[in-house]
Image: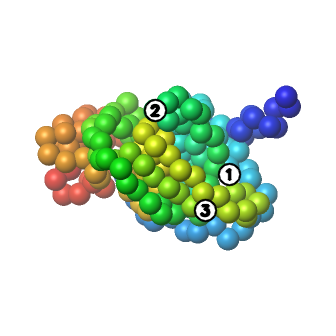
Amino acid sequence: MRNRLIPGSSGRVRAMTLLGTPVLHTPCEPVTDFGPELSRLVEDMFATMYAANGVGLAANQVGVGLRVFVYDCPDDEDVRHLGHVVNPRLVETGGEMFRGPEGCLSLPGLEAPTPRYDHAVVEGVRLDGTPVRIQGTGFFARCLQHECDHLDGGVYADHVTGRARRKLLKSIRKQPWGAGADALGPEAV
């Protein structure tokens, strides 16, 4: 197999944006240019996600305010889901709501119980503009919802409530990048 067929193999690892970085908290713009720069972005995003041991990565997590995310994520049956979506829209969620541990490459080293639906459907397009519809259950559904949240300017911590939220905010403030906690609202500072 040639390396070009492995996502990220020719990409460069980009710096990760952290909680509090404005691009992470701003809704991303739709992609309108499907040229080589978009292909390079997706390749770099895969390289960055793999270098950080992630299962998903949104473009604004590498400082680019465009509606794109990549994923290499198992579902609860350990089936691997690998791909990218340009201009994704979360069009359906359903099933049971589960509060499970969730982390984020932009809030490194932390996780908190976050409510997510057990089923999610995302529609968008591929790099070549062809339509794509991705359905996920379990952990992969959590990943799809998480990445779509990023593209809308949100982070998983926005969904954490009660004592778990207070504990997460306290942990954020202890991090070297914890000054970004104010991005989560007045109770975070």
Identify the residue under disc 3: 124
Q: Residue furthest front?
A: 95
Q: Which mark is residue 58?
A: none
- Of marks 2 and 1, the one in the foreground: 2
Q: CA distance from mark 2 to mark 3?
A: 23 Å
Could you tell whether 174 is left or right of 82 in the image? left
Q: Amino acid at mark 2?
A: Asp
Q: Are marks 2 and 1 in contact (CB under 8 Å)?
A: no
Identify the residue under disc 2: 76
Secondary structure under badge 3?
strand
Residue 166: x and y in percent read 16, 42
In which quarter of the view is residue 185 placed?
bottom left
Could you tell whether 47 is left or right of 182 in the image? right
Q: Residues within 10 Å of mark 1 (few under 14, many from 20)?
A: many
Q: Residues within 10 Å of mark 2 (few under 14, many from 20)?
A: some
Identify the residue under disc 1: 41
Say above or below: 62 vs 8.
Answer: below
Q: Are marks 2 and 3 in contact (CB under 8 Å)?
A: no
- Of marks 2 and 3, the one in the foreground: 2
Q: Residue furthest left?
A: 163
Say above or below: 50 vs 70.
Answer: above
Residue at image point 73% right, 64% down: 129
Could you tell whether 119 is left or right of 172 in the image? right
Residue 143 seen in render: no
Residue 104: x and y in percent read 42, 40
Residue 125: x and y in percent read 66, 61
Quarter of the image where the N terminus is located: top right
Q: Nearer the viewer, residue 66 or 82?
A: 82
